[in-house]
Amino acid sequence: MRPPIHPAVVVFFAVALGSISGKENGPASQVPGEKPIQIPRIAAPPPGSTDWEKQAHQVLVLNPLDETPGANAELALAWTPAALLLQVRSDDATPVEAATAKLWTGDSIEIFLSSPFGSEDRLQVVATPGRTAEYPRPRWQLYIRGQPAPVAAPCDVRVQKEDSGYAMTFAIPWANLKHAPQAGDIIGLQVFFNDAQSNGRIAHRTWSPRSHPGPDYAQMQRVRLSDHASPPETATAQLRPQGFYDLCLQAIGTAASSGGEIAVWSDGRQVASGKLAAGGAKGSSAAILLPRDLAQNPKASVRVLVAGQALPGTLQIPDLAARRLDMIKSQPLVADPAIFDGDAFPKIDFLNKDLVEAAIGPYSLQIRFFDAGWKQVAVPGAPGRYGALVEFRAGDGMACERHLTLFKTPHPYQPAKDPYDVTIRFPAPFDLPSGSEEQWNISNWVGGNLENMARRDQSGAVLVAALRDLAADPARWHGFNVWRIDDDWWAELQKRLGASQEYPHLTYLPDGYDKDQRAWPLLLFLHGAGERGNNLDRIKNAGPLVYIHQGHPLPFIVVSPQCPEDEWWNPERLMHLIDEVSAANRIDPKRIYLTGLSMGGYGTWDLAARYPGKFAAIAPVAGGETPGIAERLKGMPTWVFHGSEDDVVPTRYSLDIVQAMQKLGAPVKLTIYPGVGHGGWDKTYTNPELYSWFLEHSK
């Protein structure tokens, strides 16, 4: 996880954005080439001065990220040799300030800056206008790569309150970045304007090209530091899906832009046209449906002209087929019922079959059933676990695979007749008794809900199948999570079918590896939820690789795998990766170390508890697990890190395990970062003591 970027950023991966600029006139038959936006150098203004905005590059329209109505904002941009200057002027008349350190959850401005463009050391400034009695002054925070960072030179953030809103002025010193820019340099810049509503929603507006999926810097405008400003940006456009097969170009502009002709070009030809008409949030708007063959081509891109003036960037066609596939993967697939009896498997289909057919048309499901021993069967045999491997196919060739866990009972399941003997001890805050009458009510509730789960989803089947697995092999460690037990069964099936996949990963070989033929220690790093996906660039700025990229070589082979989207770390697949890496490199089996942050912290605890004899030492960061794993880790050298104010993974998750290990005399140490929320891992992985501590331990 990488706070504080708000969830709306994720929208950019599905929606291509751009801003229409009044620059580079050109005939309709020749679309001008893409050029950076120019912002002017000015004389350093006195503190608090806003006169410089008259000389600045003007952005008069920002792109809305969603349909949430909200205030408008305009930008003014300039620079001096000492700082980037930026002003946001808004008509937001209703102050809503963030009540926590998550400043982006209230009225706020977020500025992302990289110098030069594409630099991995991206700086982020988040600031609030401070317009309420509780928060009467601006507040601001600075981050590097999503983590709180030391301030080399304080930002000058000032707010002028106005009757119809506010004007917020920033001077962000270049000293906070490693690179001191000069005239002619191209930097990356992205601005979010967040207007919090009294109902808890936030209207997001952005100045960002988001012309194509890719690394984070692709979300930034390419900005040239110049002596002159580009003409004012008076309109903006974006591509939005219409259903699952069509794309609409939506444009908004100033009132003065009304009547402007819009031309949409792709691959050297004009593919659509329209006109900005009076109305809309900024005074004019247009909606243009693109040809369907273009909308279905994710390799294509479009350029947009308004009144012959070209968009400074390109808009990449989003992958609508992938959007349809994501929809299919998210639709509930149900067995009716998942807990069954008899000699036939239950019927399996989508819970919302009509919705699926309306979105993508006719489809087919090919289903293979497997018994508890991973053998494919046509009919159910003995009671117990079964698995249904479901292959989905649509008429347009789209296909994906899903699976469902089933459970067969020896006779019909009747909650009203089959009694439960359930004992639950509630935690202290409930202050509930545990007598026979209370237990009867609990048992009755469990039975009723198990019946509902059996009918509507696979939760009930997963629970009883996991308990059956535990009973069948009590010596095998599964952990304390029924879903992980279920994942183990499915991972073994995939392995037997030859469908299991190795995690994609980055491998760092230490200096001297080719010359020194000795066996080297291995450090396995597990990233957090925010780095999941299929783009290894996401994990280059996390964990030990950060320290290495800062010029600190490490005497380890460092392996950083990437977990697929919407999945959690699977211990079996991780062990397979360790075996593969060990076979391909000279690794000392007595010095294999494990660490991870957030979701990777959970994965560290889980993997170490599953295979305690594999690792010489572990260091989970901002993760957690049940204290019950302490018995398995009582001989494991462990260094635990956590922020004291973590409200994503509560600090007590680490404290409880550490205390349980300490009672067993385990070699465990704990570092709590005071005042730090869900983060602090940069402090951990840039601390040379961590790597020295690892090397102190060998099996």
Image (cartoon, rainbow, N blue to C red):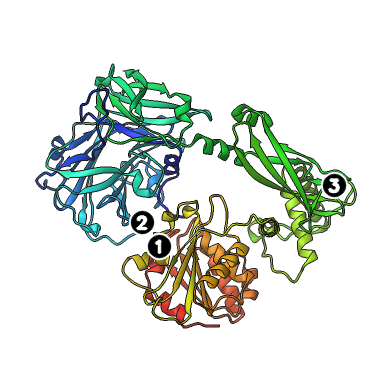
Q: Is residue 480 left or right of residue 568?
A: right
Label 2 crowd bin: few (<14), some (14–19), many (20+), radius 10 Å: some
Q: Please identify the residue farthest to the left as the structure is shown.
A: 43
Instruction: Give the residue at x 35% y 18%.
Output: 274
Name which residue lies at 52% across and 75% down: 592
Using the numbered discs, state the Cα–Cα distance from disc 2 to disc 1 in whole angstroms: 19 Å
Question: Height in image: 564 above or below 288?
Answer: below
Q: Which mark is residue 347?
A: none
Q: On the image, which quarter does residue 248 sit in?
A: top left
Residue 439 percent location from the top left of the image: 80, 56
Circle 3: residue type:
Val
Q: Mark 3 points at which residue?
A: 379
Q: Nearer the viewer, residue 359 or 336?
A: 359
User: Is there any visible trace of residue 92 in the rendered image?
Assistant: no
State whether residue 45 is above or below residue 357.
below
At x 16%, y 40%, the residue is 50
Image height of 699 relative to 579, above or below? below
Are the residues flagged by discs 3 and 2 in contact, CB closer than 8 Å?
no
Query: Which of the two labelled residues, at mark 2 and mark 1, occupies the earlier sequence position?
Result: 2
Q: Mark 1 points at which residue?
A: 675
Q: Is residue 475 left or right of residue 593?
A: right
Dot 2 corresponds to which residue?
A: 145
- In the figure, is residue 301 to the left or right of 476? left
Q: Is mark 1 on a helix, strand or loop?
A: loop
